[in-house]
């Protein structure tokens, strides 16, 4: 278990070293290959997960097979926690985007931590509030922002969390297919690809397989507004 990555989760922010070690001892490591389903929408939820390595996409699927991608999460981030506080079934499907290692904590163990360390609840609530705020922003963007603006904003968000500075710009190995990137933006693949091609022709980005190099972050930032 890579304790340094797991310790970076908001769940551990309020714990001292002894508290962190106690929670780590209660967690179970699970490994998933790319495209493996971690949990499905509609299933009962009895655990939360912390991402150790890799990436996970979280989304809704419609009855006709279409998918709306809600988020792409990376190391240190949590998923599946809503079902631990609300007995309703899972409201989304989580799928590994790359080779991924997760650490799970059962509802019983989480409640024990919260009983012993009430301050953990504050950090967990803050994490949920950030995710809700981002969801609200995405809904507003769907109404008020055009597709190129949403593409630029999502590229910047992926860069902030997964980007690596290079001599040529910010390399973002997002691990998404073109279809998955379009689902994240909330538009058709053709429209998103057109926006990406336009950005590339302007020299703002360079497209690579499941990755993008951001060459002009400032122009993208202006376009995202």
Image: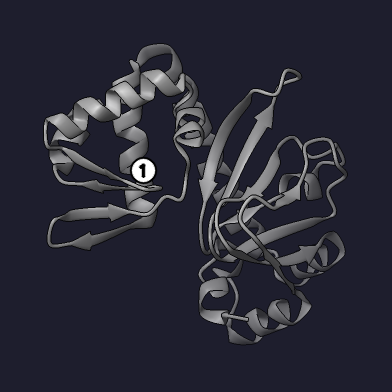
Where is residue 77 drawn, in percent x and y? 55, 58
**SS label for mark 1:** helix
**Residue placed under numbered mark 1 in the picture:** 157
Q: Identify the coloring.
A: one colour
Where is residue 165 drawn, in percent x and y? 22, 61
Using the image as rendered, state which of residue 133 and residue 220 is in the foreground.
220
Against 13, residue 74 (above or below) is: above
Please state, as top left, top right, bottom left or bottom right, where the N terminus lies in the image.
Answer: bottom right
* Picture mark count: 1
Against 210, residue 6 (above or below) is: below
Q: Could you tell me which residue is drawn at 28 percent across and 24 percent down?
A: 195
Side (left or right) of 151 relative to 206? right
Where is residue 7 drawn, in percent x and y? 55, 74
Q: Could you tell me which residue is drawn at 35 percent across and 19 percent down?
A: 147
Where is residue 61 drawn, in percent x and y? 69, 28
Side (left or right) of 34 relative to 205? right
Mark 1 neighbour class, 10 Å CA radius: few under 14, some 14 to 19, many 20 or more? few
Using the image as rendered, state which of residue 98 and residue 14 is in the foreground.
98
């Amino acid at each position: 278990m890579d304790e340094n990555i797991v310790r970076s989760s908001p769940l551990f922010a309020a714990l001292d070293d002894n508290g962190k070690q106690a929670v780590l001892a209660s967690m179970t490591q699970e490994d998933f290959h790319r495209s493996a389903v971690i949990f499905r929408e509609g299933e009962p939820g009895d655990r939360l997960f912390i991402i150790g390595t890799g990436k996970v996409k979280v989304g809704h699927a419609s009855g006709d097979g279409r998918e709306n991608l809600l988020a792409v999460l990376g190391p240190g981030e949590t998923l599946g926690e809503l079902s631990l506080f609300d007995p309703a079934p899972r409201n989304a499907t989580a799928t590994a985007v790359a080779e991924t290692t997760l650490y799970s904590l059962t509802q019983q163990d989480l409640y024990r931590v919260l009983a012993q360390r009430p301050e953990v609840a504050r950090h967990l609530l803050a994490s949920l509030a950030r995710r809700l705020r981002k969801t609200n922003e995405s809904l507003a963007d769907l109404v008020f922002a055009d597709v190129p603006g949403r593409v630029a904003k999502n590229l910047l968000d992926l860069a902030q969390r997964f980007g690596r500075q290079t001599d040529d710009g910010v390399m973002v190995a997002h691990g998404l297919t073109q279809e998955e990137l379009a689902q994240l933006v909330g538009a058709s693949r053709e429209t998103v690809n057109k926006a990406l091609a336009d950005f590339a022709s302007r020299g703002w980005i360079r497209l690579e397989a499941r990755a993008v190099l951001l060459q002009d972050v400032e122009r993208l930032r202006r376009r995202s507004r």
